[in-house]
């Protein structure tokens, strides 16, 4: 992998993304959904605050982190599995369907140049999406005094979980020339990693521990509380590398067949 060739793929993909209506539509829907959850959570928190002032014993320990920040980040983490497949499903599938994939395989670039360039471009679009939601905690700081720590770690966790979903989506995009199949497959696999821990009450302690380690959402929970656990960071990094590696193997197989 060379930096110049990866950069060329990155610029090509980023230019395509921001010249496409899809990226703007996905970003708009994402920001509106995040805003909807923020508005509702803040509304419920305000009602609970009024009730607490009227009856202080009825709502002990009421705070913005538990009432608004943490559930907001948890909801956004779930929204991502619905939104990000719309960005990743075309990455390789579209090129396979249009025939430009064969041309890409003939270029003097490695599989990792193509994979990393496309991945970083999509990750950049996602980073812009996340940055647009910073408006919501800024509103909290303007009118209240929320804890800064959970907000910073929460955004870091969202970035990691989004990066993991994008890597997974890129892999499924390498498997088919049908964008819809790639998108649905990404959603299904992401949903499995999201809800896999639901089986914990019905299995043995050892199996429950394994399911907890596989759950993408359980590794996210500590971030929204202001805790930065290196085990959670390593989990997401391994997740990303694993799916990028699988993507490179698929591209290598396609290159060999096309040759």
Image: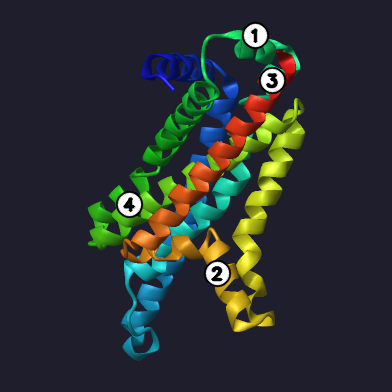
Q: Position of residue 48 (x, y in %)?
A: 41, 75
Question: Foreground mark, 3 or 1?
Answer: 3
Residue that label 4 marks: 137
Q: Badge 2: how crowded within 10 Å, few (<14), some, or many (20+)?
A: some
Above or below 151: residue 14: above
Q: Position of residue 3 (x, y in %)?
A: 37, 19
Residue that label 2 marks: 212
Q: Quadrant of residue 251?
A: top right
Q: Badge 1: how crowded within 10 Å, few (<14), some, or many (20+)?
A: few
Please tell me which of labels 4 and 3 falls first in the chain.
4
Badge number at residue 103? 1
Badge number at residue 29? none
Please tell me which of labels 2 and 3 falls first in the chain.
2
Please tell me which of labels 2 and 1 falls first in the chain.
1
Q: Quadrant of residue 220?
A: bottom left
Q: CA distance from mark 1 to mark 4?
A: 46 Å
Q: Secondary structure at mark 4?
A: helix
Above or below 106: residue 96: below
Q: Secondary structure at mark 2?
A: helix
Please tell me which of labels 3 and 1 falls first in the chain.
1
Residue that label 3 marks: 256
Q: How many circles with numbers are drawn on the protein?
A: 4
The residue under the point 36% across, 50% down is: 156
Q: Badge 3: how crowded within 10 Å, few (<14), some, or many (20+)?
A: few
The residue under the point 34% across, 85% down is: 60
The N terminus lies in quadrant: top left
Q: Secondary structure at mark 3?
A: helix
Question: Foreground mark, 4 or 2?
Answer: 2
């Amino acid at each position: 992998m060379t930096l110049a060739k990866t950069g060329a793929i990155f610029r090509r993909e980023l230019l395509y993304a921001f010249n496409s209506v899809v990226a703007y539509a996905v970003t708009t829907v994402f920001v509106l959904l995040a805003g909807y959850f923020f508005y509702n959570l803040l509304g419920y928190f305000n009602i609970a605050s009024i009730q607490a002032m009227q009856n202080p014993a009825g709502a002990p320990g009421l705070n913005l982190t538990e009432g608004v920040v943490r559930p907001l980040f948890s909801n956004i983490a779930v929204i991502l599995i619905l939104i990000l497949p719309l960005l990743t499903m075309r990455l390789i599938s579209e090129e396979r369907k249009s025939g430009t994939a064969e041309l890409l395989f003939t270029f003097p670039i490695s599989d990792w140049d193509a994979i990393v360039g496309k991945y970083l471009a999509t990750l950049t679009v996602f980073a812009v999406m996340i940055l647009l939601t910073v408006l919501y905690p800024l509103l909290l700081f303007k009118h209240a005094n929320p804890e800064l720590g959970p907000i910073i770690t929460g955004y870091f966790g969202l970035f990691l979980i989004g990066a993991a979903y994008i890597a997974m989506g890129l892999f499924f995009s390498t498997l088919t020339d049908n964008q819809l199949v790639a998108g649905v497959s990404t959603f299904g696999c992401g949903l499995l990693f999201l809800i896999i821990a639901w089986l914990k009450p019905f299995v043995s302690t050892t199996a429950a521990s394994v399911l907890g380690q596989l759950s993408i959402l359980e590794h996210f929970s500590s971030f929204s509380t202001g805790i930065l656990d290196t085990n959670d960071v390593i989990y997401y990094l391994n997740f990303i590398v694993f799916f990028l590696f699988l993507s490179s193997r698929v591209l290598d197989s396609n290159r060999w067949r096309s040759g």
